[in-house]
Amino acid sequence: MKFDTPATANPIDRGRVVGIAHDRIEGAAKVTGTAPYAYERHDAAPNAAYGWIVGSAIGKGRIAAMDLRAAEAAPGVLGIVTHQNAGPLGKGDMNTAHLLGGPAIEHYDQAVALVIADTLENARDAARLLRIDYAPEQGRFDLAAERDKAAVPRAGFGGSADTSAGDFDSAFAQAAVKIDQSYTTPDQSHAMMEPHATIAAWNGDRLTLWTSNQMVAWGVSDMAKTLKIPKEKIRLVTPYVGGGFGGKLFLRADALLAALGARAVGRPVKVALARPQIPNNTTHRSATIQRIRIGADKDGVIDAIAHEVWSGDLPGGSPETAAQQTRLLYRGDHRRTAHRLATLDLPEANAMRAPGEAVGMLALEVAMDELAEACGVDPVELRIRNDVQYDPEAGPQRPFSSRKFVECLRQGAARFGWDKRQPEPGRRREGRWLLGMGMAAAFRNNLVVASGARVGVDAKGHVTVETDMTDIGTGSYTIIGQTAAEMLGVPLEAVTVRLGDSRFPVSSGSGGQFGGNSSTAGVYAACVALRAKLAEKAGFPADEVTFDDGLLRMGNQSQALGALAGPDGLWAEDKIEFGDLTKRYAQATFGAHFCEVAVDMDTAEVRIRRMGGAFAAGRILNPKSARSQVIGAMTMGAGAALMEELHVDTRFGFFVNHDMAEYLVPVHADIPDQDVLFVEELDDKSSPMKAKGVGELGICGAGAAVANAIYNATGIRLRDYPLTIDKLI
Ligand code: MOS
C-alpha cells in the first residue's frame, strides 16, 4: 500500500481498541522472567559453548604479535578466534569500525579475540592468558583539541550538514537583542538494561542467531556482508529486547564473534558483552560543542538564528546532528545551521535515543531561556511568539503536517502551575533549599519508514500477526495487536502477535521513534488486504463491509471470520510504503517540558521535585505505553542534565567509567513526581494510523528544563553538561 495522499476516515478512527490504554500484552512474561532474552535461550542451543571477547588494550595502533599457546592449553578451551584465523571478513554498511580488529586497531576495546570454552568461567580465565603485543600509535582523542580541524561530514549520513536562509550575518549584527553562547555535552552511553548478547548456531551453511537487536533486516544484511555469505542463509531471532536506545541498531561484536566462534568449534556458541565492555566496545553518543546565536527584537521575536555543532567520530563516521531542531522549531527569516565532524580515534560514535535533538535541545532551549531573560519576556510566551506553522527554511509552501506546539505550551504551563514561577532567580527559599522552575520546548522529527506484515485468521476466528518488528521495551507487541484487533473487529485477546524474526516480513524496526507509527501502518496495510480477501470469500464488495464482534457484516447479513477463513485459515501480506508527503509537509512532534528543582545552598546538591510536560504526537495508539515512553525519556533527559557522562582519558583514548557504578543514570527516586499530558492531535499526513512517533520526544528538551530550573533557583547559568555539583559551587 502506497501512502502518498492524506489519510481519510478508516476503521482505526473508531477507537475501540486503538487509542485505549492497554497493559502490555507481553508484560506478565517480562516481569515474571518467562520472556527469555537471547542469552537465556537454553532451549534453542542446549549444548552451546561459551565465548569471551578480548578487547584491544590500546586506542590506536597495531597488533605486533599474538601468542595464544597458554590460552589454548587452558582447561576447557575449545578454540580461539582472531583476525589470523577468522578468514576474510567484509564489513556491514552500518558499522564504522570493524567488529573484529587486528592487525590494525581502530579503537580501545575493539574485539581482537574470542576465547571459546565449555564454561563461561573457563573462557574468561583463558582469555587472561592471551599474550598480545601492541605497537601503539598516536591517536586523536580530544574533541576540543580537534575542533579546528573538523570538516564537513561525508554526504549521506542521514541529513545535510549545512542549511541557510536569508542573510544571517547582517540580520544578527542589526538585532536589538543578541544571544551568542556556546554549550557542551559529553559522550554518553546507552546503558540499556540487557547487555548485547547472542547465541549463534550453524546448520551446514545456514546460520541462526538468537540475539538482541532493534533492526532485524539490517542485522541480517550486515552479517551477510561481513561473513560474505548470502543473507538467505541467515536467520536472526530477537523477540524480546531488554532496551536498546540506539545501541542495538546495528550488528555488534557479540553477534559476529558468536557466529565465527560457532563455525570454529563446530557447535553453538553464546557470547554476551560484560557490562564493563559495553561503553568502549560498542557505540556511544558523541560529545558536542555547540554555538548558538539568536538575534531578536526587544519583544523577543527572532529575526536571526544560527546553530553550529562540532562532534567527533572515527574516520568514515557520522556527526551528531544536534542542529536539526533549529531548522524547524522557531521563526526567523535569517538562519544558518552547520555540522562539523572531527576525526577522533575514540570508540565508534553513533545514534543514541533521539540522535541530534536530544543534545541539540540541551543547548537551544537554554539559549532560549537566556533570550527570554534578556528581553524580559516569560519563557512560555517567548516560545509562543516564535511559533511558526511552516518549515522556516523552506517557507510557507512547506507547512507542518500538524503542529500543536502552542497548545502544548499553554496546556502544559496551566497544568504545571507555571504562573507560580518567580521570574527573578534565587528568590524562592525553603530552609536550606533554593527553589526554581524552568521550562523548555520538546521537539523531535517524525520519520516514516516502509514496513511490512502478514496477518492471518484461523478457523476459530483467532488472528495472528507476523512482522520482523522488534519490541525493545516500548510496547510494540501491544500497539500492533491493537491495530489488528481494530481492523478486523476482534478483541485484543483474540490476536497473537509474533515479532522479531527474520522469517517474518521486513518492518521498519525500532529506531528514530519511527517504529510505532510505521510498523502499525504496515499492519494496517496487511489488514486491509486480509479484509479484502475475507470480503471476497463472503461475496461482498470490500469497501462496503464492516468488521465487528468477530463478524464480517454487510447490511443486516453477517458471517463469522473463522468460518470464512476455513480450516486452512486465510492470510494476507502487504507493506506500507511512504510517498512524498514528507517532502510536501514538514513532520515533527512537539511538546513543552516543565521542571521544579531544589538546590541545597551549601552543598549545591540538586534535587528534582517534579517534572511535567504536554506533548502532541498525532494519535496516541496506547496512552499507557506512550506515557511510559515519555516518562522514561524525560528521566533520560534528567540524567543528561545532571549525571550522564563518559569520561575520556585523552592520553590513551578510552572511556574510563565503564560500569553502572560510575556511569550514573537516574532512578525513580530521583524524580518523585512526573506528569504527562497528551494534547489531542490526529496527523492525516503521517500515516493511515494518523499517529506520529513518541518514543524519543520526551528526552528532547527535558534536560534543558532542568538546567533552566537550576538557573531560576540559583542564578547560576551552566552551559557545560552534565550540571554537576562541582560546577555549581
Ligand atoms: Mo534510536 S537512537 O534511532 O534507537
Image (spheres, helix red, strand yellow):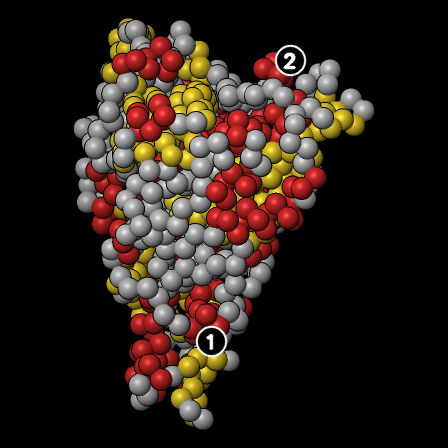
- Tag 2 secondary structure: loop
- Tag 1 secondary structure: loop
Q: Name the quadrant containing residue 146.
A: top left
In front: label 1 or label 2: 2
Mark linked to residue 729: 2
Residue with the mark numbered 1: 489
Q: Nearer the viewer, residue 389 or 678?
A: 389
418 relative to 159 in the view: left or right: right
Disc nearer the start of the sequence (1/2): 1
Looking at the picture, does residue 121 appear above or below residue 685? above
Looking at the picture, does residue 16 appear above or below residue 160? below
Q: How far from the left and from the top, in percent, is residue 89?
A: 21, 30
Q: Nearer the viewer, residue 660 or 349?
A: 349
Give the residue type at disc 1. Answer: Gly
61 relative to 441 in the view: left or right: left
Q: What's the residue at 51%, 38% (across, down)?
A: 382
Q: What's the residue at 61%, 25% (across, down)?
A: 711
Mark linked to residue 198: none
CB atoms of marks 1 and 2 within 8 Å:
no
Looking at the picture, does residue 590 appear above or below residue 108? below
Quarter placement of the C terminus: top right
Query: Is residue 192 visible in the rendered structure shown here?
Result: no
Quarter placement of the N terminus: bottom left
Q: How far from the left and from the top, in percent, is residue 330?
A: 41, 40
Q: How far from the left and from the top, in percent, is residue 63?
A: 28, 12
Q: Name the quadrant containing residue 127.
A: top left
Q: How far from the left and from the top, in percent, is residue 539?
A: 31, 89
Q: What's the residue at 24%, 24% (across, down)?
A: 152
Q: Name the quadrant containing residue 602.
A: top right
Give the residue type at disc 2. Answer: Ile
Whole-angstrom CA distance, mark 1 to mark 2, is 61 Å
Task: In the displayed orientation, state which residue is furthest to the right.
Answer: 431
